[in-house]
Amino acid sequence: MDDPDTAQEASDPGADEDRDRTRLQLVLDVLVFQFKLAADGLRDVLLSPLSLIAALMGLIAGGDDPYRYFRDLLRFGRRTEIWINLFGYRKHSGTSDELIAPIKEKVMSEAQANPWISKAGGELNRTLDTMGERIKPEQEGADKRTGKDAD
């Protein structure tokens, strides 16, 4: 006998489309996060020697304000941190998200409009669903250690 949940999922193409869109969104979000991690890492690599140069310049040419160059470097570092917005904490303008958002929207619309990409995505999603079914525990909702239903 068919599982009613499976029958309902099979008859609801909207649920499949939402799931497919969510999976694509996850992939795009991970790619954006990787881009931001790379930008953040590059910034850190550059700031390390620049901080030493700023300190040396402050000691040699800083006059009454030896911190001047180092303060400028810290200010630059804060601005780049805000722009990179690694964890998406800032929602205001002036972040890399403004640059990335139109690209993500274009990829999402192309993926939905292009029949070849849609077909390939559908096949990939069916494969992922099959893999997910194999991973699910035999007793869904039951704790394998105790055999009792989970709350």
Image (tube, rainbow, N blue to C red):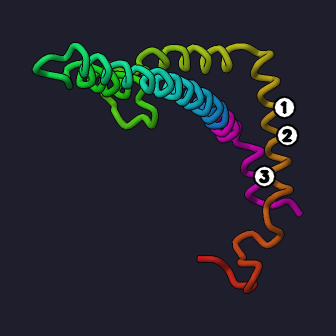
- Residue linked to disc 2: 127
Q: Residue at x 48, y 19 (%)?
A: 101
Give coordinates of residue 4: x percent, y percent.
76, 59
C-alpha span from label 2 to label 1 = 6 Å
Q: Is residue 17 magenta?
A: yes
The outermost residue toward the right is: 1
* Quarter of the rendering containing residue 108: top right
Q: Is residue 141 left or right of residue 56?
A: right
Q: Is residue 138 above or below residue 105?
A: below
- Residue linked to disc 1: 123
* Quarter of the rendering containing residue 83: top left
Q: N-terminal of the two: label 1 or label 3? A: 3
C-alpha span from label 2 to label 3 = 18 Å
Q: Residue at x 19, y 20 (%)?
A: 68
- Residue linked to disc 3: 7
Main SS of the magenta segment? helix
User: Hey, what amino acid is under mark 3?
Assistant: Ala
Give coordinates of residue 151: x percent, y percent.
58, 77
The magenta stretch is 1-20
User: Hey, what amino acid is under mark 2?
Assistant: Thr
Q: Assess whether mark 1 and mark 2 are in contact (beta carbons under 8 angstroms).
A: yes
Q: Is residue 5 above or below residue 126?
A: below
Foreground tag (2 vs 3): 2
Q: Is residue 38 left or right of residue 27?
A: left
